[in-house]
Amino acid sequence: MNLLKLLDSMCPDTTNSEEKDRFYSRREAFRQFGDMSKKMALAAVPVSLLSALPNVAKADTDSLIGVLNYALTLEHLEYNYYQMGLDSGVIDAAERPIFQKIRDHELAHVNFLTEVISNVLMGTPVAEPSFDFTAGGNFMPFDDYPTFLALAQAFEDTGVRAYKGQAGNVMESDVVLTAALSIHSVEARHASMVRRLRTKKGQDMTKGWITGNDYGTLPAAAAGIYAGEENVSHAGVNVVNLTGIDQDAVSEGWDEPLTMEQTLGIASLFLSS
Amino acid sequence: MKKELFKPQGLIQHTDRRAFLKMGTLSVAGAGLLLMGCKDDEDVMPPVSGGVSLGSGDVGILNYAYALEQLEAAFYAQVMMGSYFANASAEEKTIMGDLEKHERAHREFFKAALGANAIADLEVDFSSIDFSSRNSVLGAAKTFEDLGVAAYNGAGQFLESGDLLLIAGKIVSVEARHAAAIRDLINPNSADFAGDDVIDANGLERTLNFQEVLTAASAYVKTEIDFSQLPS
């Protein structure tokens, strides 16, 4: 169900017009499949179409698998975190619907990415890591609700930046890119909700959007999650100078990416060794 | 190569599109506009009279984003002049003020980035929105923010430039943050901030194509928008 742009970027390895037609019609089938994919049950996904896959450069497929396994690692982290939070009873009863919904999305992302990696790209999904959400005994998120919320914000804002940082690395595949964008905005919705909830509960003064590189009342270790978010120049245009709008508001209007290395540095705090 | 390999099969004929857009307007705006619509039909419409053409390629996509940001920025500017805003809670005033600045910054950025390729200013029509009503304002804000997210998510795949894709990605997540906040104002502490109406069972947010987005937007835009040259 992926590889559309990969297919686009390839020419059929033939001068035979009949074979070319077949190549293009296969590609069109994939494209249409991409359009349909969201209406289909996941289990029905792509297996039946795989036989139509022409020879795609293995390096490109490997690259997509690498990016999606990276995303899957983060989704495993998030899903486990929310499930453990719900199981622990740390979450205020009135707010459980929020975290049940977020947990449902993270689990859906785990399942979706696993399916795409294994049955579309024919790769091997990463195993679920072992997590230590105390980060070596520093945090007690399942005993202390404000800590739970603070780490949830950290994970969601990191997730938004992580997906954003990979957009360019999956743009060869229309379907993978669109799926990644469609996960990315869901993570952003989560982030906005958790941030505002913390403020509503008097734990921070943060807004749904990120002001400068401010990490509010999160632990100082969270500074890296927000480093770079203060950027106000895009495509060479300094938007503060352009508009006269204040620096804080302009920085809020654009979220910034993180590289895989930066993200894994943050996530590694929560992996048990 | 994509351009060479693919004929733009999705091109929408001008006349069909007009009819379609008009239907979209009617279904949203209701009976008041129905009469105007009927009258309109009898007029001989000059092609793209006073309208704008988004253009093709990445420029076309940027103009598409610019059109949506124009709509959002104009909406929040008007919100801030209405009596809902004047009487709103401190929290909601802050949110509306932020959203006005963010969307204005987005609009001005796209205008600058597009330079001579930028479409003209759109003429908006917010007559269906009651700016003294919290429900009406928040309902419209939800529509605009959700629509913006779905539009960016749907358009990303058509961008050829990785740099522009990243910029679109920087903006779409902020639109999603807006959408979640507005939804939470409407139905606080519920699951609506990321509701099943916009997110499917795979945890993927909906995408909308150019026609779907511009049809929905046409309820609020008088200027005719020709998107027939956008990539497909």
Image (spheres, grey):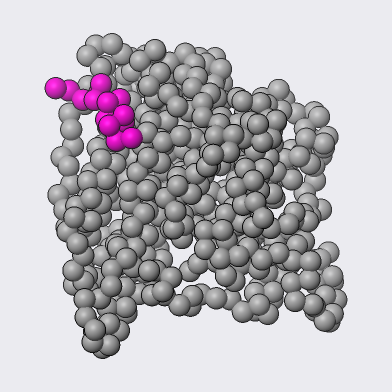
Q: Is residue A11 visible?
A: yes
Is B210 included in the stretch rendered in magenta?
no
Vertical arrangement, residue A105 with respect to residue B30, above or below: above
Q: Is residue A85 left or right of residue B223?
A: left
Residue that appears at 21% across and 65% down: A56
In x, y percent, where is residue B126? 78, 51
Q: Is residue B29 visible?
A: no
Q: Is residue A19 left or right of residue A216?
A: left
What is the count of numbered marks? 0
Residue in front for this viewpoint, A217 or A148: A217
Magenta-drawn segment: A259-273
Vertical arrangement, residue A16 with respect to residue A245, above or below: below
In x, y percent, where is residue A255? 49, 35
Residue in front for this viewpoint, A125 or A11: A11
The kind of secondary structure the magenta stretch mainly shows is helix
In x, y percent, where is residue B139? 67, 45
Q: Quadrant of residue A2?
A: bottom left
In x, y percent, where is residue B152? 52, 52
